[in-house]
Amino acid sequence: MTEGHGAKKGAGGMGDPRIVRRPAKAVPAGLRALHPVLARVYGSRALLDSSELDHSFARLLSPEGLKGMDAATALLVQALDARWRILVIGDFDADGATSCAVACRALRDMGAEDVDFLVPNRFTFGYGLTPEIVEVAARARPDLIVTVDNGISSLAGVDAARARGMAVLITDHHLAGDVLPAANAIVNPNQPGDGFASKNLAGVGVIFYVMLALRAQLRARGWFARRGLQEPNLARLLDLVALGTVADVVPLDANNRILVAQGLKRIRQGESCPGIVALLEAGGRTPGRVTAADLGFVAGPRLNAAGRLEDMSLGISCLLAGEAMHAYELAQQLDRLNRERRLIEAGMQEQALDALRLLELDAQLPAGLCLFDDSWHQGVIGILAGRIRERVNRPVIAFAPAGEHELKGSARSVAGLHIRDTLDAVAARHPELLQRFGGHAMAAGLTIARSCLEPFRQVFAEEVGHRLGRESLQGEIVSDGELAGPEITLELAELLRDGGPWGQGFPEPVFDGVFEIAGTRTVGANHLRLVLQHPDGALLDAIAFNQADGAWQPGQQVRAAYRPDVNHFQGNRTLQLVVTQLWPLAQS
């Protein structure tokens, strides 16, 4: 996720979304004891009973369902018994960083005497366990390499490590290719033959499950008593699991909602690691009131900034910091990197929009869009692809130079198009166009030869066109319907805030309705503070972020997409509407 909840003014330009209301359904009997709006929201998200809102740790799926878990724990037990040197190799995003932190902290707490981590520099080594990163890893002489959030496609890298006498445990969640690497053990819910009920674990969720299973094995062997170790409470790592899960934008199915809810609970209770507290405070958030959105839009981008611009080791060090002051210093460095990232992104986005303006109309855009500029930064193209995707409502790949002859691309997709499968289809039809690729449904990375950009651009657009109808290329805001004036209360805002965790696959409720603007003023850099009058007569405070430049006037009739929210100011709690989209009524 990237930072910001900006509204759009809906002036009828390129990519304006339309409102689609969720179908009205009878509220399931098991939800009727809840607030009626909350019951309606849950019912539209396929919940049938309030028991499904129980996010207690006891309801978490068992690790036993994950294929390869027995081999993985046996390997780790052997490593602990023999005092092996263990090297954790992560990815350079927030999921990879939190996965690294979970593995290092858990293994050390379970008695591992020599555990370190290594994260490939994305600009030098690229993604995953490559033969080149194995060369770097070999300098530390590890007996065991544990990959987190990567490795399922690292065939050559695993071979290189095994040839040097290193054992390899792969923990990953990305989709597997036709051939699996020859690792000693693989744990990945998306590998062939895996029967785990949730395929949506992030990388940090996978390594957390491995650590749960390892602790159970060690407990059964009497390991902790023999070594005089206190059995670790792995629930204290759930703040990291929550951050990585939300930041990686994996679907929040029932199991992931438990992981995130438990992590948020620990953060709110003051039981989080100093690094996460410092990241939230650097973004102006109060840990005691943290939401899933704060993890995705505040902590996540600051953590990701290290991997995008420099080295994710800085972010991992922040998460592993044991002292609040040390964590604060590292979080401030990450915050500065994030501000630098935003400046770079703003310039790249303006260049991309200039290129789009050369196309006459939205209808002239290809179904799948490829953008490239020689000046673009590899570490920011993923964010850029996401921003442009939001504007043009179609899959976007942004490319940046990677040496003299190669381009690195970052793809972001739309609902209804599995981007990794789309790239797989392109590779099957035109194997000469793609050197490497990987990813999942909504995001992917790829490498192509610079000379292949134009043919790839055409083939990608054609493949997307085959898979998506034109109606899918118009953006949609899915609304939970209208609210009557008396329903829009502070109580409802608090219930909705606490009713998640909301996120990918379990979207935060959005409502829509017609209002009259009763007043406007600019606050902050570019935010629009509004007073909206509901048709029932109620006057409601509202804010539309990044919309102070819109031509909105008192007395104007508008349609708004919004969510009720709680505004904390000077110790007071008041109701405000956060407007995510605003249209003049004539254009709604």
Image (cartoon, rainbow, N blue to C red):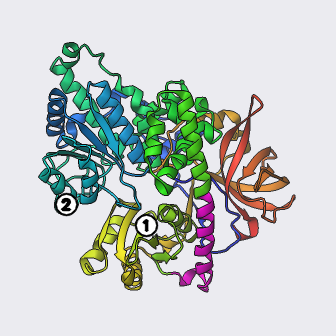
The quadrant in which residue 115 appears is top left
Residue 364 within the magenta-colored segment of the rendering: yes
Instruction: Return the residue nearer the eye: 202 or 367.
Output: 202
* Left or right of 308, for residue 528: right
Give SS at disc 1: strand
Q: Which residues are magenta?
A: 342-365
In this view, the mark in front (1 or 2): 2
The image quadrant of residue 51 is top left
Q: Magenta includes 353?
A: yes
Label 1, label 2: how far apart the Cα atoms are: 24 Å
**Mark 2 surroundings: few (<14), some (14-19) or many (≥20) residues within 10 A:** some
Q: Position of residue 530 (x, y in %)?
A: 80, 51
Where is residue 302 shown, x and y percent of the image?
54, 47
Q: Could one spot residue 25 in this view of the protein?
A: no
Residue 506 at what x, y percent from top left?
A: 47, 47
Element marked by disc 2: helix
Q: Are marks 1 and 2 in contact (CB under 8 Å)?
A: no
Kindly identify the residue that appears in the image at 60 percent across and 66 percent down.
Answer: 18
Residue of label 2? 156
What number is the disc on residue 495?
Answer: none
In depth, the one of 341 and 524 nearer the eye is: 341
Looking at the image, residue 253 sits to the left or right of residue 383; the answer is: left
- Mark 1 lies on residue: 411
Can residue 403 be seen here? The reply is yes
Residue 410's image quarter? bottom left
Residue type at numbered disc 1: Ala
Prevailing secondary structure class for the magenta stretch in the rendered image: helix
Residue 76 x, y percent position in the rendering? 19, 34
**Residue drawn at the location 53% of the way across and 24% of the way down:** 269
Q: Residue at x 36, y 46 (%)?
A: 202
